[in-house]
Image: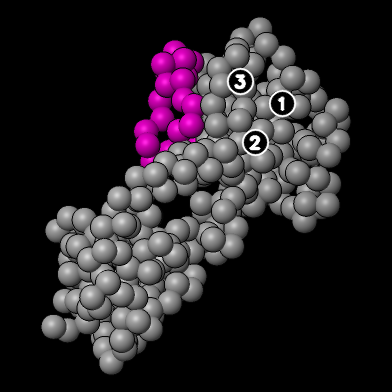
Amino acid sequence: MSKIEEAQEILRTLGFDRERSNERAALILLALADIRPDSSWNDATNEMYGTRAIMDFIRDVYDVDYAANTRETIRRFTLHQFSDALLVEQNRDQPDRPVNSPKWNYAIHPMALTVIKAYGSPQVDELVAEYLDDRPRQIETYAAAREMRRIPVTLPEGKALTLSPGGQNVLIKQMLDELCSRYTPGGEVLYVGDADQKWAHFDQKRLKDLGVEVDSHGKMPDLVVYMWDKNWLVLMEAASSHGPVDAKRYGELSKLFEGSTAGLVYISCFPDRKTMRKYLADIAWETEVWCADAPSHMVHFNGERFLGPYD
């Protein structure tokens, strides 16, 4: 058998269905294990690789060139399933890495590596049986550890939810805990974004009542709060890993919320003033700026009024 056929047989032996043991899945396994056509399976390794590096290996070693736009297909329909079955582990070097980080990586799980290295040996059947028997417990342990790393937040009305660890979600928690209590007291949180789960909290009906209808393609702000006493919709962007409400983003949000019967307030939120300084020249006029390292203060980008909508 060719190395691709052998990889497919390994995947089937480990319980993967036809989709997860097809040629693409086999090539991904070969790339993760650093197995070349003339390699022995005993030479398999479990170094960390990003999706681009996996695709480059497949192209250079097995002469299969996947188009750049298939990267998401490889992630969603193969690597994520490999991860769910604990064939691979994600971000061994930094488990709380943000899901949208370019450094996101995959490596064969040590438990699976032992089985892969034994392919073709007399011990492989016994090792496969041990792997399949122990995998449910390992998956449960891994899921529990992953859940513990999630960031717990409580909305003002008492609803509890969790956000994926790292990245801008750390700042979003500070916005909910610190900014909302000071500047939108009693406000209703209508939307909370999460890089891992875009619509972490979404009160679609309430927004529709306010004249706002958003489809799944709308690029929502990170946090939306309705202040019913003033009839304001406060749109907040967490600018820890991307830019603030600049002129372009101001236009996008104005268009997205153009049907709102509530006045619109725009706030760029930064983790600290050092980060804010990088973007000072870009921040749109008639918006507000808040920094988590000075939560009781806000910077107003215009002199006509403080914290309120404009016509």
Residue 253 in view in this figure: no
Q: Earlier in the sequence, mark 2 or mark 3?
A: 3
Q: Which residue is mark 1?
A: 177
Residue at 38% over, 55% down:
86
Front residue of 227 and 31: 31
Front residue of 24 and 200: 24
Residue at 58% over, 27% down:
224
Residue 92 percent location from the top left of the image:
54, 61
Q: Is residue 211 magenta?
A: yes
The label number, if any, that marks residue 155 in the structure image: 3
Q: Which residue is mark 2?
A: 172
The amino acid sitting under disc 2 is: Ile
Residue range (magenta): 199-221
Asked if 173 appears above or below 311 in the picture, the reply is below
**What's the distance in space between the residues labelled 1 and 2, CA to CA?**
9 Å
The amino acid sitting under disc 1 is: Asp
**What's the distance in space between the residues labelled 1 and 3, CA to CA?**
8 Å
215 lies left or right of 106: left
Front residue of 57 and 208: 57
Rendering quarter of residue 19:
bottom left
* The C terminus - image quarter: top right
